[in-house]
Amino acid sequence: MHRNEASYWRNKNFRASFLPQFRLNATLPAYSNSIKRITNDQGEDIFVNQNQSRIDARLFISQNVGFTGGNLSVNSQIERVDIFGDNPSQGYSIVPFSINYFQNSLFYNPFKWDKKIEPLLFEESKRGFIENMEQISLRTCQLYFNLLKSQIQLEIAHKNLSNLDTLFQITKGRFRMGKIAENDLLQMELRLLNSENDVTTNMISLKKSSQDLARYLDLSTENIELNIPEKLGQFEVDTKRAIEEAESNRKFVIEYRRRRLESERELARIKGENGLKINVNANFGLSQHGPELNDLFNNYDQQQNLTVTLGIPLYDWGVSKSKRRMAKANLDLVITNLEQENQAFEQEIYLHTLNWANQRNFLATTEKALEIANKRYDISKKRYILGKITITDLNLAQEEKDKSTVKYLNSLGKFWMDYYTLRRLTLYDFVADKKIEAVDIFSN
């Protein structure tokens, strides 16, 4: 959430940087009473006592010029200097209007690259926010089924304990009548004790699962009762369609372009700053100065300044060349890494889509196996009560029933986990047949 909010305000700041900026700078006042060294008209350095104060104000409008990479500003400035001491005096200076343009380099335009990269960063953040929300859904699904499985296993443990207690009473009666050996009685008693331990173990597991889900969702209670979710409607996921949606919706695609552009920008910056450098600083305006403020607003003098600074590399022992080669090598490395990451990205979606195609069949199979195991156990329990099978056969039937229950719950949980993983990988809801979108919570 905070990362997404920071990205939003970064984008707002980027957009605002290309709008006119109004600013007032003022010095109120600057006072100095000290000995300073100055150079007089004869070119001699002398020391003078300076006792004065200065007040100035400057109002300006500045505008970044994206096309050239420079900054254009319109300024208005007024300044007053008061001299103290034996011969006090005052003076004014005014610049009612001046235009200034500054550009650091003619061969590297940072604004051009910012206009390419910043929108990608913002879009990447928005898609990352949706991916994080889907990751939360995936984690919630996992915790949901952990708790659901703990609840059902505890119900099974209580039911098994109740059944075994009844069967143990029946077994003791048969033993007293001499119909079974003591070994069978002891085996049934051991099963009963183990069942009591299973109830305790599953109660602890249920408590932990409840706490995990409540803490993750910031719920006010840990007493959560869950139901087995309804089955999803039938829908097909085509591998090609899944990859297309992922490439259209996932932040990785934007990140791919952004990382490549950042590497290209770095190469362009090094080329621009390590070759021939030309800096331009130009100023045109009007100015006037004098001892009286009212006399400054007529007969303006023109002020014009133009500074072009050249930086020409003559010989730097290969420093500039090595920087360019290093930046080019880094760009090639980024491109190679991104291509490999893209292949791994597509492979992950491809394999998960194939797995999803079989997951519904796995769920149906384990559901059928659970139905058979429950039916077999009911029959075995009735036959044991009638004395037609041994305690060993009954134990095997109960173990198969419990294992089938766990397998079904695991398969059901994996089915839903795979569904939410598919959503996270593609950012597409195949049930509703639409892209997954998030409301812009920072639109205001």
Image: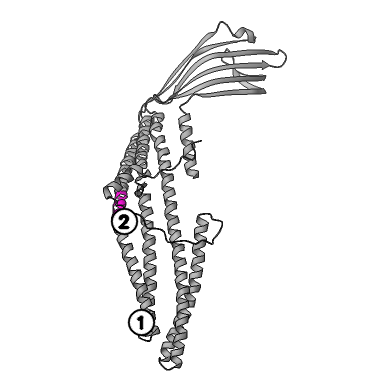
Res 291 visible: no
Horizontal side of 83 relative to 323 (left or right) equals: right
Picture layout, residue 139 above or below residue 258: below
Residue 322: x, y in percent? 34, 37
How many residues crowd around disc 1 within 10 Å: few (fewer than 14), some, or many (20 or more)? some
Quadrant in which residue 78 is drawn: top right
Identity of the residue drawn at 61% across and 19% down: 56
Q: Reading the chain from its start, which is encountered first: label 1 or label 2? A: 2
Picture layout, residue 111 above or below residue 285: below
Q: Residue furthest bottom?
A: 178
Res 181 visible: yes
Residue 386: x, y in percent? 38, 85
Identity of the residue drawn at 41% across and 35% down: 118
> Camera-side residue: 421 or 317?
421
Horizontal side of 168 relative to 421 (left or right) equals: right
Q: How many numbered markers are drawn? A: 2
Query: How far, Cα to Cα, is label 1 from label 2?
Result: 37 Å
Residue 55: x, y in percent? 64, 20
Does dot 2 land on a helix, a strand or a loop? helix
Is 140 included in the stretch rendered in magenta?
A: no
Identity of the residue drawn at 52% across and 57% down: 215
- Foreground mark, 1 or 2, reads 1
How many residues crowd around disc 2 within 10 Å: few (fewer than 14), some, or many (20 or more)? many
Identity of the residue drawn at 51% across and 61% down: 224
Does dot 1 land on a helix, a strand or a loop? helix
Q: Amino acid at mark 2?
A: Trp
> Camera-side residue: 37 or 423?
423
Q: Which residues are magenta?
A: 344-355
Q: Residue furthest top?
A: 299
Q: Amino acid at mark 1?
A: Asp
Q: Which residue is mark 2?
A: 356
Q: Which residue is mark 1?
A: 393
